[in-house]
Amino acid sequence: MLIIGERINSSRKAIAQAVASADRAFIQREARIQEEAGADYIDVNTGVFPQEEADRLKWVIETVQGVTSLPLCLDSPDARVIAAVLPLVNSPPMINSITLEPQSLESILPLVVQYKARVIGLCQGQGQLAQSVPAKVELAGRLVETVTAAGVPLGDLYLDPLVFPLASNIQSGVNVLQAISRIMKDYPGVHTICGLTNISYGLPNRKLINRTFLTAAMVSGMDSAILDPTDRDLFRVLKTAIMVMGGDEFCMNYIKAYRQGRL
Amino acid sequence: MLIIGERINSSRKAIAQAVASADRAFIQREARIQEEAGADYIDVNTGVFPQEEADRLKWVIETVQGVTSLPLCLDSPDARVIAAVLPLVNSPPMINSITLEPQSLESILPLVVQYKARVIGLCQGQGQLAQSVPAKVELAGRLVETVTAAGVPLGDLYLDPLVFPLASNIQSGVNVLQAISRIMKDYPGVHTICGLTNISYGLPNRKLINRTFLTAAMVSGMDSAILDPTDRDLFRVLKTAIMVMGGDEFCMNYIKAYRQGRL
């Protein structure tokens, strides 16, 4: 299970403030606690600074790389921002994200190839958000074709089937689970990923829903996730689900986490 | 999701004591709290009284039926005990359980037919416990054949693929999940069920594992479970998993449980 730590996202007020005031210690602490909690990538996002997104992101990247050697997940839909910061990263990053929209493919895909990056592909085309299972699977297939045709290895592609709120369509969860299961069967070697939080939008006790949905997605074959690994309840469920799914030989990691007082 | 409340089991010390001392109020409270928590059946077991299992079970049944009209799940491997108590039940019960062992089939199956009972079929044959996926699926198929040939409707059969501890085989969980998925696909209309607690045997923080495994089994297609519906954390996960799997139109039951302070 590959974990992208989601905390350094400027949509969180505390992060926006730390970026605005160039609070190095705060951002570095956010990176460190995610590494300690088991993140494989650190997501970095400065999207709330539209005029200065690239400059702010450069600062965040240098700040984070000052304290961890974990690779970064560069979180911007803007190819100019991605292009501006790519020369700064110390190791091949993940790019979050591309879609099937022509301007996304034309501008970001060449950067993925040039920098041997991994890339998150959203099941989203021109004016088309994949709601149904067939739509998700169809857009996933077109992403696989397009991205591999450009020279990106299939194993570097992380398909996000798009999660919509249960509150607006009770089938939203099942649609994602079935799409994940189909995608992982149809394209062996590709990865699936999703953000968890959309599923619970508009409902009470969101974290309970998010972590239950994480288990469900893992059972359906999802092998990576963008989440907050420092969320203790989420971490407990994550470690337990990995073990239940057979991914923790002799239950060693589970028992270790228990001894560390983390379960 | 069909829930069998497991609390009135004499392997629990408090239950054994209440049965031994004929503590009507205690047993009736155990029945009531499970009904209030959403149980569909009340399991009744007096297995720790080997010489008097049938008499004790008669007393428990009369006691429980004095306070609830929920159907009962008669929990004994002994056909004589089942035969002795069946005339007492107010509505068609579930019988827990039969196996493929000849003495089980010959003695219990006719009672299932005669009383139009539902029945739990363990994937267990003569000297054979189903550990692997093919073994579980094969024994499930033989149970389907045998039980329906005797005249029991397929929809009255609850197949239990047998859960073994993760601590002794890390694939135990995945084997159950894959077997459930195969069984539900191969025999549309049949039900699957399991006890959750074996999965966590020998590991710390067992309830965390049990409820994560419940979610995983539900995602794999399991449509009934023997559990303690008054376990608050388990209840939260159960209600949430039902919603995530699309089984809670407009999220009504989830929101209701939230308003009742149960999430």
Image (cartoon, coloured by chain):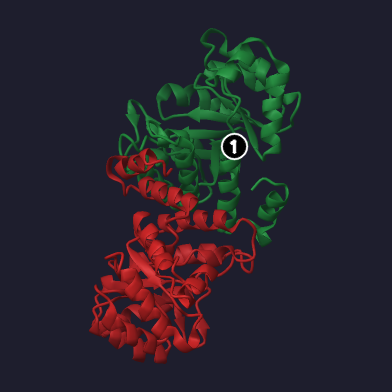
Chain colours: A green, B red
Vertical side of A84 occupied by A212: above or below: below
Q: What residue does disc 1 label?
A: A231
Q: In the image, is residue B243 above or below residue A88?
A: below
Which percent across, then down, holds residue B230?
A: 44, 55
Q: Residue furthest right?
A: A66
Type of amino acid at the residue the image marks with label 1 = Asp
Q: Position of residue A103 (x, y in %)?
A: 43, 21
Q: Residue at x 38, y 43 (%)?
A: A173
Q: Is residue A261 left or right of residue A108?
A: right
Residue under the image location 48 percent in, 29 percent down: A98
Q: Hey, which quadrant is residue B95 in on the image?
A: bottom left
At which x and y percent is residue A194?
Answer: 48, 38
The residue nearer to you, when weighing B123 against A162, is B123
Identify the element where label 1 is drawn: loop
Residue nearer the viewer, A175 or A81: A175
Q: Is residue A46 left or right of residue A255?
A: left
Q: Nearer the viewer, residue B166 or B198?
A: B198
Residue at image location 69% in from the left, 49% down from the top: A257
On screen, residue A147 above or below B81: above
Kindly identify which chain the residue marked by label 1 belongs to: A
Taking depth in this image into account, of B34 and B245 the one nearest to the observer is B34
| Dot 1 crowding, Cα within 10 Å, few <14, some 14–19, many 20+ | few
Is residue B167 toward the left or the right of residue B158 in the image?
A: right
